[in-house]
Image (spheres, grey):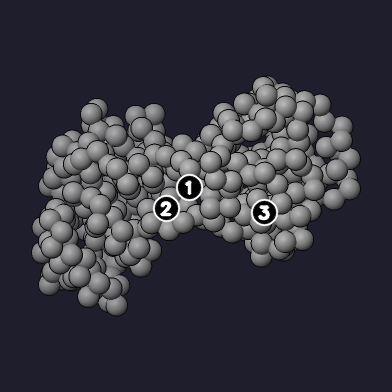
Amino acid sequence: MNKQTVRDIDVKGKRVFCRVDFNVPMQDGAVTDDTRIRAALPTIQYLMEQGAKVILASHLGRPKGKVVEEMRLTAVAARLSELLGKRVVKTDEAYGDAVKAAIAEMNEGDVLLLENVRFYPGEEKNDPELAKAFAELADVYVNDAFGAAHRAHASTEGIAHYLPAVAGFLMEKEIEVLGKALSNPDRPFTAIIGGAKVKDKIGVIENLLDKVDNLIIGGGLAYTFVKALGHEIGKSLLEEDKIELAKSFMEKAKEKGVNFYMPVDAVVADAFANDANKKVVNIDEIPSDWEGLDIGPKTRELYRDVILKSKLVIWNGPMGVFEMDAFAEGTKAVAQALADAKDTYTVIGGGDSAAAVEKFGLADKMDHISTGGGASLEFMEGKQLPGVVALNDK
Ligand SMILES: Nc1ncnc2c1ncn2[C@@H]1O[C@H](COP(=O)(O)OP(=O)(O)OP(=O)(O)O)[C@@H](O)[C@H]1O
Ligand SMILES: O=C(O)[C@H](O)COP(=O)(O)O
């Protein structure tokens, strides 16, 4: 990576404003998945060991510039304290005199967590005044919030203009793994793209078609491709206005010598429900009043073979409605194939695919699970991430 990291600066005795992505799932006031908190620990612990005063900042949810009680970071601070085995002071605001006073009390190695930065309208507007108010709290800025790096906000981008700005270890790892895949991949290189809509994956499919050897399509978006081939798809998800685009992707794949894999069979159901009637049909035999909710067994075998023969696989988006057990088998089969592919470097592109490998208990079998959903998608589209661009060059 051509950006400076925490290794490139001296933080001893310094106040370090460290942006993390603690946007974690919560239920009834408790953190239900602490993956993102654990992912930031290497940077936090390093800063503590180096004798920095660690001031952490994060958003949680989308409070739209107002204080929303359920989106306070109090439970996150408690979980972080447990993980660090050390008290984490949590302030009720994210800048201002009370925060400055709390920081003045800090000793080297102490950790403080600011309140949700999205409680202030200036955060998402990237207001320079708010960015300066954050910068006033510290001597150095560290960005370890890969998951929010696609947002040009005051705490992810603006502040970097007012302080020496470097990347944390999580940010560095995410950029290195995803960057290597896109610029210098081990081959055969396979991308698996699933999820609900073609619309959300246009950029990533376009960019990856220039780079991969194999492109595997699954999930709801596959049906627009099936339709583009001239087959009936019953009540399956269809984006009429993307049929031509789907055709052009298939043509481009042919021109570029990319193997384009589509489902050859599907699990169809007579309703969008776990207890619906379901059956397996060939992809060109979907009955008119049924909908495809998962890839079928022949497709699972086909995709497994491609995965096992690959040296690098990137996966983004589930193969079916995996939240319902009745339609989770396709997503599970892909996750299992990735887990079994010992000579393959496996990268999970965040979001629902990461949730799926967690759900199936296969997370520890993957080489890299991105902590970014939207951020990893934008990175795979070949876009520059503002939170990274703003950091100091090496
Ligand atoms: N055949 C299908 N029909 C309808 N919905 C489907 C189908 N296959 C998958 N889905 C749904 O697609 C959703 C995931 O799509 P999405 O595009 O959000 O994926 P993602 O990119 O992994 O997620 P994220 O945006 O969180 O990164 C899941 O909720 C899943 O139930
Ligand atoms: O969960 C995420 O993808 C990041 O934390 C960014 O959140 P946002 O989509 O609300 O900006």
Give above or below for 355 relative to 269. Answer: above
Name the mark nearer the viewer: 3 or 2.
3
Instruction: Indicate the position of residue 270 as horizontal and vertical percent values.
Output: 25, 63
**Is residue 151 visible to us here?**
yes
Gap between marks 2 and 1 measured at Cα = 10 Å
Closer-to-camera residue (214/83): 214
Q: Residue at x 19, y 49 (%)?
A: 214
What's under tag 3, amino acid-wise? His
Neighbour tally class for label 1: few under 14, some 14-19, many 20 plus, Cα within 10 Å: many
Closer-to-camera residue (123/71): 123
Which element is circle 2 on? helix
Which element is circle 1 on? loop
Please tell me the numbered disc located at residue 106: none
Neighbour tally class for label 2: few under 14, some 14-19, many 20 plus, Cα within 10 Å: many
Residue assigned mark 3: 161
Residue assigned mark 1: 372
Please tell me the numbered disc located at residue 379: 2
Give above or below for 336 relative to 282. Answer: above
Neighbour tally class for label 3: few under 14, some 14-19, many 20 plus, Cα within 10 Å: some
Gap between marks 1 and 3 measured at Cα = 23 Å
Whether residues under marks 2 and 1 lie with C-beta atoms below 8 angstroms apart, the answer is yes
Task: Return the disc, 1 or 3, that comes first in the chain's sequence.
Answer: 3
What's under tag 1, amino acid-wise? Gly
Instruction: Indicate the position of residue 50 as horizontal and vertical percent values.
Output: 68, 24
What's under tag 2, amino acid-wise? Phe
Whether residues under marks 1 and 3 lie with C-beta atoms below 8 angstroms apart, the answer is no
